[in-house]
Image (tube, helix red, strand yellow):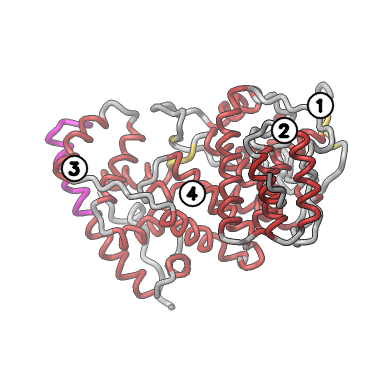
Amino acid sequence: MFGRSRAARQVDGGQRLRPTTPAPASASDQRLEQMFVAHHAMVWRTLRRRGLTADAAADAAQQTFLVAAERLDDIQPDSERAFLVGTALRVARSMGRKTLRWQLEEDMDRRVVAAQDHAAARAAVELCDLALSNVDPDVAEVFVLFELEGLSSPEIAASLEIPLGTVASRLRRAREQFRRVVSRLETAIRREGAP
Amino acid sequence: MTDRDPERLRVVGATDLEKRLLAAAASEAPSPELRRRMARAVGVAASAAMAAAPTPALATGTAAAGASWPLVSAGVLVLAVAGAAVGWSRLHRPIAAPAAAVRTVATNPPVAPVAPVAEAAPVIARTHRHVAPAARAGDLRAEIALLDAARAAASTGDGARALTLLRRYDATFPAGTFRPESAALQIEALARLGQIDRARALGQAFIAAHPDSPLVARVRHAIGDLR
């Protein structure tokens, strides 16, 4: 624990830190930490792509890892990502957060103009989210996990508890929809003169 | 399924704009503040989370109104401001090394209903943590996250899990803002689990320690002390 370990430590000039009370972490503590280090950004991003704000995504990510902490024994080492993603999406649903549903025509021009005020990368994230919000949610979920987070089809199938064939067909449909929306965005950008 | 996955769109076939959007979304990362908050809520050493974080193309978070701190300097800033004893040496040590900063929940045994719970009264005198004000906002939200999880467990009747989470809270936040709430929740959980003697002992200690607390009524109710 952060607080407890600091309490247990002595700071001594430039010397290396030493615990005053050796307290080795349990195997499950270490495993949870490793899982957190390896996957917390992915979990957070997955929640962000569902429309949660940065803060809300952090809240949901916390809950996800707290659930994982209680279920470590059930999680196979090579299924950690799938477990975390599946849990994160369930947490998001149970939090009752509504995904932002931007209306393409109404918001697009305004957002494109607003995007010019932000750093380019932030603008690109917003535009990506705008595009995703105009893709059917079921297929968008698969798209995000495959294209953005790099999960394999079997992992996605496990996370979402759907057959592999469904993963493939949703990915195909998502790509079609996403690309159609982005080409409309491109038209709007050119019209508004954004870089 | 023997078919191989298709190539990612970013890698093959995307237009320039598609690539830009996908690349930006794929590399979005939580801000250092959010990262720390999540780590604390989960009970993981925040320094380890920072150390392993890939340098993000951009960081998004509550403080980041368009700002995008280089991860390394943000990490130094956070640690320096917190007055943490962690220091840079921790960041350069492999996570698996015998570590002072690793979670030390180990000394709290896994909760069984009969396991003794940490005293409600202030525990072992701990070295005072120098927590700078800048760290507090993140701590509070992490504290709340843990307490909410415990409350949720208690409300579904999972007293054992509630106790696990509350002990994690006590261990993570020895000087936490919500120590009294944690104590009250533990007393309630113990009472519901049937450990009425223990609940009563802690309850009376709580009432003696916090006579004016608005939680006293709840604690009395939990231990059957109707007044």
The quarter in which the C terminus of chain B is drawn is top right
Residues at badges 3 and 2 in contact (C-beta under 8 Å)? no
Identity of the amino acid at label 4? Ala
Q: Nearer the viewer, residue A111 or B21?
A: A111
In three-dimensional space, the C-alpha distance between marks 1 and 4, rounded to whole angstroms, equals 35 Å
Q: Residue at horizontal 79%, vertical 40%? A: B205
Tell me the element at label 1.
loop
Using the numbered discs, state the Cα–Cα distance from disc 3 to disc 1 in whole angstroms: 56 Å
Judging from the image, mark 3 belongs to the subunit labelled A
Q: Image quadrant of residue B171?
A: top right
User: In this figure, which residue is indicated by the disc labeled 1?
Assistant: A11
- For the record, the magenta segment spans A179-195
Q: Amino acid at mark 3?
A: Glu
Residue at (80%, 58%) from the top-left corner? B115
Quadrant placement of the N terminus of chain B: bottom left
**Could you tell me which secondary element the residue under label 3 belongs to?**
helix
Query: Does residue B46 lie above or below A39 as drawn?
Result: above
Q: Is residue B130 left or right of residue A68?
A: right
The percent position of residue A174, horizontal first and vertical second, equals 28, 60
A157 sits left or right of A28 in the view? left
Position of residue A85 measured from the top left corner of the image (x, y, whole percent): 48, 58
Confirm whether the magenta stretch covers residue B17: no
Q: Amino acid at mark 1?
A: Val
Counting residues from the start of the chain, the first of labels 1 and 4 encountered is 1
Up-down relation of residue A48 to residue B83 (above or below): below
The residue under label 4 is A60
The residue that mark 3 highlights is A186
Measured Cα–Cα span from mark 3 to mark 2: 65 Å
Q: Amino acid at mark 2?
A: Pro
Q: Is residue A187 magenta?
A: yes
List x then y, in percent, for residue A107. 19, 39
* Residue that mark 2 sits on: B211
